[in-house]
Amino acid sequence: MDETAVALQMILGLPTASVLYISSKVNGGYDDAGLYNSKCYFIQPSFYIAFMKQYFESKEWNDKIKWSIAVHQAVNRSLDLTIDALGRNEFQEQLQKFRRAQAIVTRTCADSALLPCSA
């Protein structure tokens, strides 16, 4: 995610502050499903049991997700080529600057952010 934000920042010529964000995970496990209608839903913690592990390692599962994997790999390759075109050294400098700024945002703003399900 950070790499995508920095690539977008560089392509559009934006200041770092324009692509900083606050993680939705600071919201106590609630989401409003994008409706903003004052109805919030608790997001159940994930869990993993033995039969699920077996299924996710099966040929059947891998056959179902092979095209999703192909798209994911193509997107990652495209991002890598974009970073090369932007200049990998300049990109790495901007990424480090972004991560330092992101750490400050998380440390100073996450507890006071007013998210849709904060109340």
Image (cartoon, rainbow, N blue to C red):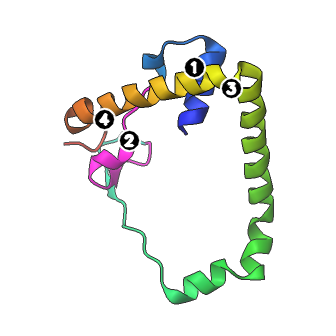
Residue 93 x/y as whole percent: 55, 22
Residue 33 painted magenta: yes
Q: Relative to 69, does residue 53 appear above or below in the rendering? A: below
The label number, if any, that marks residue 88 in the structure image: 3
Residue 104 painted magenta: no
Give the CA separation, mark 3 to mark 2. Answer: 26 Å
Q: Give the side of residue 58 with respect to residue 70, left or right.
A: left
Q: Quadrant of residue 6?
A: top right
Write the residue at 47% across / 18% down. 16
Q: Residue furthest bottom?
A: 51
The magenta stretch is 20-34
Write the residue at 64% across / 23% down. 89
Q: Earlier in the sequence, mark 4 or mark 1?
A: 1
For marks 1 and 3, give the one nearer the viewer: 3
Give the CA separation, mark 3 to mark 4. Answer: 26 Å
For marks 2 and 4, give the one nearer the viewer: 4
**Secondary structure character of the magenta stretch overall:** loop
Q: Quadrant of residue 20?
A: top left
Pointer 1 and pointer 3: residues touching (CB < 8 Å)? no
Q: Give the side of residue 23 with respect to residue 83, left or right.
A: left
Q: Earlier in the sequence, mark 2 or mark 4?
A: 2
Judging by the rendered image, the residue that carries numbered circle 4 is: 106
Residue 74 x/y as whole percent: 79, 45
Pointer 2 and pointer 4: residues touching (CB < 8 Å)? yes
